[in-house]
Amino acid sequence: MKTTLDLIVFGATGFTGQLVAEYLNATHGVGGELAWAMAGRSLDKLVQVRDRIGADPALPLLVADASHPASLTALVRQARVVITTVGPYQLHGTALVEACAKAGTDYVDLCGEPLWMAQMIPRLEGPARKSGARIVFSCGFDSIPFDLGVLFLQHEAMQRFGKPLQRVRGRVRVMKGSFSGGTLASLLATLELTRREPSLARVLADPFALTPGFRGPAQPDDAGARYDEAAQAWTAPFVMATINTKNVHRTNALRDHPYGRDFVYDERLLAGRGPAGQRRARRLALNTKLQNAALGFAPARALLSRYVLPKPGEGPGPHERETGRYELVFSGETDDGRTLRAVVEGDRDPGYGSTSRMLCEAALCLLQDVDRGMAAGGVWTPGAAMGMALVRRLQERAGLRFAIDDAA
């Protein structure tokens, strides 16, 4: 089947998929320079989404099902890049990404599932290299602002100091908004998988689980309440550190260790200063411990999934998405003691408003800004595949800001 489209949004009838389609329609329309389409299981639902987002009736609608590999093979051959929001990926994603790897079609997703990614990397690397497909996981809030935050800081360190920062700390200073139902569903699926196969817990805890063939130095323990001397504030565990830290180390490994082979990185929540900050950090750490204990208990997971946590396909309204925001701080030092700090800000809620834009712009960056001389076929991170080209694009189009804090 001949490639006739630049881009396909697979899962366009889901909540995040609709946001992606809405953004593409608002920024590129239909019938212009970007030839794109929506895809999903139900033609009727695709028509409803097309009408809801105000897209031209000429927008192509394609039917394909994650449980029918043949339909996915036919789908991906029609496009240069596929965006997929259909997760959890460990349950619904394998057939699509394998089809892209074999067909030579670029692929971006929102995956924050390190166990599945660890399985897919060796499985996809050979076919993707052979076909030329660029497979890029984790193109949403996990892990673009963190992966690119470190990359941006290290880029500036090389410009200023001529050497990388050997130690970097990622700190979440502000996060107004929610995680998506898909992210939470992926977490629950991962916990269920480790319950069935306890040996996988070691992979989940390994900061170098996504860098096959390389192991760096010991990394900081992210448990409990801790005082951060660099920030002069108390910190608590950050739930997404498990995936983000792995992606940061993978970016370093894929680009032949520009941060150094002895690079150390961790992520935590800033809880505040003084006794009040200490109390908040301890409370947050205890809450994390209790939540992990509850999620580790199968009946509790079932109750939370059924009655408490947002479902995939559910999400906040426009006001909540547009008034959300986040602010991340990255600080580090070279091996001779010179320091640098950067701030990354997003102007929408992390789980939906910002994530949908980051995902779109990552796909468009692969399509328009990064040729195969810069990133050949293979399994990539956003930072390794697109680097500063994606930083620039996100600042220009997606409401993100990357800046060095010279007052630090």
Image (cartoon, rainbow, N blue to C red):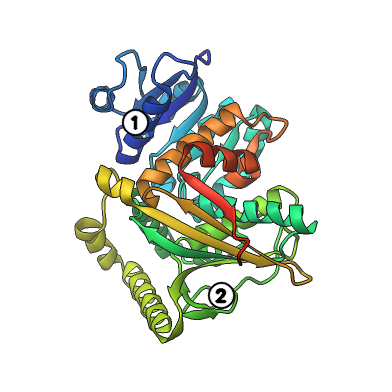
Quadrant where the C terminus sits is: bottom right
Direction left: furthest residue: 307
**Where residue 296 sits: x, y (%)?**
36, 69
Task: Count residues near mark 1 (Cα–Cα under 10 Å), then give few for <14, some for 14-19, many for 20+.
Answer: many
- Residue 100 makes an appearance in the image: yes
Instruction: Look at label 1 and name its amino acid.
Output: Glu
The image's mark for residue 221 is 2
Task: Count residues near mark 2 (Cα–Cα under 10 Å), then give few for <14, some for 14-19, many for 20+.
Answer: few
**Where residue 256 sits: x, y (%)?**
75, 50
Q: Residue at x 22, y 60 (%)?
A: 308
Mark 1 vs mark 2: in front: 1
The image's mark for residue 22 is 1
Q: Is residue 208 above or below residue 10?
A: below
Horizontal relation, residue 231 to residue 346: left or right: right
Q: Residue at x 75, y 72 (%)?
A: 337
Q: Secondary structure at mark 2?
A: loop
Q: Residue at x 69, y 33 (%)?
A: 376
Q: Is residue 208 above or below residue 131?
A: below
Instruction: Look at label 2 and name its amino acid.
Output: Asp
Q: Is residue 81 above or below residue 180?
A: above
Direction front: furthest residue: 407
Q: Residue at x 72, y 57 (%)?
A: 157
Q: Earlier in the sequence, mark 1 or mark 2?
A: 1
Front position in the image: 100 or 45: 45
Front position in the image: 131 or 59: 59
Horizontal relation, residue 375 to residue 221: left or right: right
**Where residue 161 sits: x, y (%)?**
78, 59
- In space, the residues marked 1 and 2 are separated at their CA atoms by 41 Å
- Residue 314 makes an appearance in the image: no
Image quadrant where residue 26 sits: top left
